[in-house]
Image (tube, grey):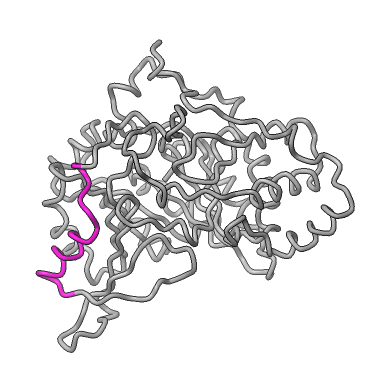
Amino acid sequence: MTERHMRRVVPLLDQRSSLPRTPDAAFLSNAKIIANGLLSDTRGRPLRDLRISVTDRCNFRCNYCMPKEVFDKDYSYLPHNALLTFEEVTRVAKVFVAHGVQKIRLTGGEPLLRKNIERLIEQLATLRTVEGLPLDLTLTTNGSLLARKATLLKTAGLQRVTVSLDGLDDAVFRSMNDVDFPVADVLAGIEAAQDAGLGPIKINMVVKRGTNEHEILPMARRFRGSGIVLRFIEYMDVGATNGWRMNEVLPSSEVVKLVHTELPLVQLEPSAPGETAERWGYANVSGKHDVAAGEIGVISSVTQAFCGDCNRARLSTEGKLYLCLFASRGYDLRSLIRAQASDADLASAIGHIWQNRGDQYSELRSAMAADNGNGQRRVEMSYIGG
């Protein structure tokens, strides 16, 4: 097996030796503030959003995420006993919620491939924020299994879904997923999610210049007025396997300009602090936002950094905590859990990690290679989720 085929292409840092197992009085005093949701990092950014990857497997082979030449039949995925159990995920999530997390998104790989995922959703749906409110509990999926799962997910307590869809043209879509999966089945899944009440639904379209930019307008036409928010995402330099090149990035500004030529847009205010998408509403004849027509979003991961108010943490399938989508190292929480660490110790570890966070990769991007500048390869999107 070549280095490119190895699962652990990313050096993972085990921080347990530097984290206090028996906090002193000063640390415990600070932990009281943390428990009230006032945790912030070195740049004053709060912890509000947790992305949890529940599997490193996917049934698509999109070339910007899990290209077939790397993720082939010989690829070694994580063994089942390496994955966090649903009970372990829920326990960690509960600690994060005590630190101020208000939103949890389940990702993958393809999260609907995780057997009995509904059980995990049921457990997470019982958690309450520090204000006593239900979590914003959502899931990102490629939509391939959504038609058969939508009602079960809603019954379990999932609130909404985000579906990845990179075009409406069947030939383009089959080519991009690289497993010949028909777009009609994904559209059927989206319809089933709407019928089940999993909304508001968001659709993410990764735009890759030279591949699917001609699908931008058809996608905008299709979902305008549908109650679904379509978001265009710049092709990102995540990991090392997707062969990313800057000349394949179509800047979000060009996407907005293209849509605006046919469907006039007006810029909207962010929906929440730390929102990654810039919002654009469809305009009426008076140039005001036509609420019934809806809106689009653009996520400018390459051309416009949004590190300044990033409030997201990411938990990998095997329990590594990552502080940035472009990180090259994770912090091993699974070892703490399986060493019978108390909830207080786990909370102290997470608090220590976040308080020392200073990540700002997008703001510092100077080299467009997968190398992060010190010889370490960044974590793959298929491993940590988008």
Of residues 201 and 340, which is closer to you in this image? 340
228 lies left or right of 46: left
**Residue 142 position (above or below residue 79):** below
Tell me which corner region of the image, top left, top right, bottom left or bottom right, holds residue 73. top left
Of residues 108 and 349, which is closer to you in this image? 349
Q: Main secondary structure of the magenta part?
A: helix
**Residue 253 position (above or below residue 55):** below
Tell me which corner region of the image, top left, top right, bottom left or bottom right, holds residue 175. top left
Q: Quadrant of the N terminus?
A: top left
**Residue 359 position (above or below residue 260):** above
Image coordinates for residue 366, horizontal then vertical, percent: 35, 43
Instruction: Say which residue appears at 36% left-offset and 30% top-offset.
Output: 240
Image coordinates for residue 342, horizontal then vertical, percent: 81, 42
**Residue 40 position (above or below residue 346):** below
Q: Farthest residue toward the top?
A: 1
Image coordinates for residue 209, horizontal then vertical, percent: 16, 45
Magenta segment boundaries in residue numbering: 247-264
18 lies left or right of 53: right
Instruction: Say which residue appears at 61% left-offset and 31% top-offset.
Output: 13
309 lies left or right of 73: right
334 lies left or right of 159: right
Instruction: Say which residue appears at 35% left-offset and 24% top-offset.
Output: 71
In magenta segment, residue 28: no
Image coordinates for residue 126, horizontal then vertical, percent: 66, 58
Tell me which corner region of the image, top left, top right, bottom left or bottom right, holds residue 84. top right
In magenta segment, residue 253: yes
Q: Farthest residue toward the bottom?
A: 286
Q: How many marks?
A: 0
Of residues 260 and 119, which is closer to you in this image? 260
